[in-house]
Amino acid sequence: SLAAGAIDSVHMKIERLDKKPTTHKIQFRSSMNGSLIMKQNADSSYTVTLNGHSDKDEETIEAYYIDTLPTQKTKEYVIGKLKIKTYAPVNKKVTPIILNGAKFTVNPQELQKVLNNIYKQAATQWVVNQPVNIDVNKAAWDLDGDGILKIETSMFARYSAAMQAIIDAIKKAVTADPEAFYVVISDLPNNLNYAGYMPLKAECAFLFINTNPSEANAYHTIAHELGHGAFYLRHLEDE
């Protein structure tokens, strides 16, 4: 997919099944524009420029060649297609919440860069706000006193009682922004040893830094969890 008005490119390489060199001239065309801006590279691959059109526009790029038959007639062969859909750009916001002094430093610029790189094919731009430090009394969420942050395992609930208590405390502590998502960053252990958690269509994700071995891993976990809440994406095994 492409954002409306955006310019991108796709790299294509044509290989014959018999591994012999391609002798025909490969051409490209668009179902919308006809001809395309195309460059043939030194390794015989091609770079084709793509243009985002209007919201919901669909375009098909075809690679083809024309062969001359023994009868001297010509025949066209389509050897590949690429379907592209254009979407209006989407802007989303996320605020990291550092829970009870969790030992993890969020770099908003770096996290924003990771999110935008991952979600660019969905025509989505993220803005990462400055992290907010929030303390939630242990008595409010640790109902059984074992120090473990419980993740809900019932199919009939989204958040456990412990998580909901933390979310309620966050809502009281920060100015509500109905358009923002929140990522609670915690160094507490959890009962399922998950790296992160976010229900579908939810506004609040949890990141467990004890099961994310690096900053890069943590940022990709955040991107993964936001896919559940912001875009309703399910795990393949849940389909």
Image (cartoon, rainbow, N blue to C red):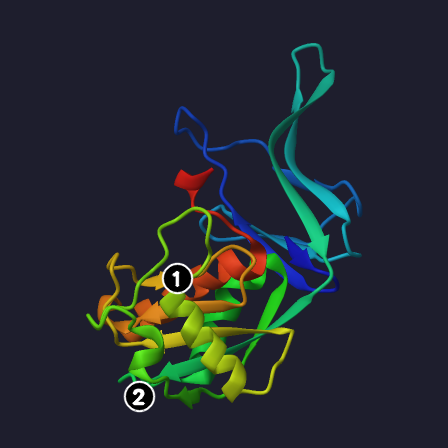
Horizontal placement of 135 versus 117: left or right?
left
Residue drawn at (29%, 59%) of the image? 194
SS label for mark 1: loop
Asked if residue 87 can be seen in this view, the reply is yes
Picture layout, residue 38 above or below residue 135: above
Residue 46, horizontal then vertical, whole percent: 55, 49
Residue under numbered circle 2 = 101
Looking at the rendered structure, the number of numbered marks drawn on it comes to 2
User: x and y percent of residue 208 in the render?
Assistant: 30, 70
> Can you give x and y, in whole percent of width and height, for residue 142 in the image?
29, 73
User: In this orientation, which residue lies closer to the viewer: 2 or 110?
Assistant: 110
- Residue at the image position 31 percent from the left and 80 percent from the top: 139
Q: Which mark is residue 184?
A: none
The CA span between labels 1 and 2 is: 22 Å
Which class describes the residues within 10 Å of circle 1: few (<14), some (14-19), or many (20+)? Answer: some
Front residue (pair 170, 208)? 170
Q: Amino acid at mark 2?
A: Gly
> Circle 2 — which element?
loop
Relative height, residue 73 to residue 195 (above, below) = above
Label 1, on which residue? 160
Q: As drawn, is 176 to the left or to the right of 136?
A: right
Q: Tell me whether circle 1 and circle 2 mark residues in contact (CB < 8 Å).
A: no
